[in-house]
Image (cartoon, rainbow, N blue to C red):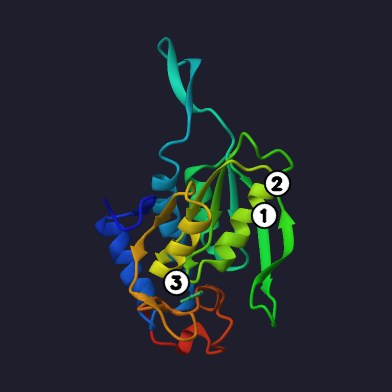
Amino acid sequence: MSEFPGLHVVDHPAVADRLARLRDRDTTTPVFRALIEELGTFLAYEATRALPMHDVRITTPLIDTTVKRIATRPVVAPVLRAGLGLLPGFLSVIDDAVVAHLGFYRDPESLKPVPYYANVPSELADRHVFVLDPMLATGNSGVAAIETLIERGARSIVFVCVIAAPEGVRTIRAAFPQVPIVTAALDEGLNDHAYIVPGLGDAGDRMFGSVTSVPVSVRAQG
Ligand code: URA
């Protein structure tokens, strides 16, 4: 058994190749955003594999028949702000999902994540909830996101990320052993600034271009 039961690393050349390009520091903001979106699709495909189905009667142009449809309307909860990058890809797989938003800031003294925004459907008990956060680093904001959803009634939650650090996986597994984690990669660990190594840097900054002000036209192309 894996060191981390409940951790599913999506092992596919199309995923690995996109992740390799994401990691490259020369990949430009628009390309980075497109790659994250595509990874959102692949990760959603894996994360939603166990969604319940039900039989529906339809009429094709030829005959009446019974088909399978997804039986519930899932909830997808991106953690602001980097989780937004995975959202379009996720919605391209589960187009009927309800989108919740979760925001946290870090308390300067305790360094713990404090919720500042939670726009979540009121009835979560029978919903399948997917938390999106590209980088599972310390796991603190992941735990806070899952706590917020459980406080609001959620019972079925999957945590979806692009890169996980072992530290973050341990933190989430210890707090919520019932929550599966779906990721594109399990990296080596965290550095002294809680960045994932080898990682890809700050996912939010890279997808929203909030650090560099050099226009795309004069940046090296990825
Ligand atoms: N958040 C990021 O965006 N990158 C990391 O490496 C860790 C946390």
Spot the residue most to the top.
64
Q: Is residue 18 left or right of residue 167?
A: left
Residue 165, visible in the rendered structure? no
Q: On residue 18, which mark appears? A: none
What secondary structure is marked by label 3? helix
What secondary structure is marked by label 1? helix
Amino acid bearing label 3:
Phe
Q: Is mark 3 within 8 Å of ligand 1?
A: no
The residue shown at (53%, 86%) is: 215
The residue shown at (56%, 67%) is: 140
Reading the chain from its start, which is encountered first: label 3 or label 1?
3
Reading the chain from its start, which is encountered first: label 2 or label 3?
3
Whole-percent x, y for residue 169 in the image: 43, 62
Whole-percent x, y for residue 201 in the image: 45, 80
Amino acid bearing label 2:
Arg
Judging by the rendered image, the residue that carries numbered circle 1 is 148
User: Do the residues bearing badges 1 and 2 touch, measured as CB atoms within 8 Å?
Assistant: yes
Against 113, residue 195 (above or below) is: below
Whole-percent x, y for residue 222 in the image: 36, 78
Judging by the rendered image, the residue that carries numbered circle 2 is 152
The residue shown at (44%, 23%) is: 68
Residue 171, visible in the rendered structure? yes
Q: Is residue 211 left or right of residue 118?
A: left
10 Å neighbourhood of mark 3: few (<14), some, or many (≥20)?
Answer: many
Judging by the rendered image, the residue that carries numbered circle 3 is 32
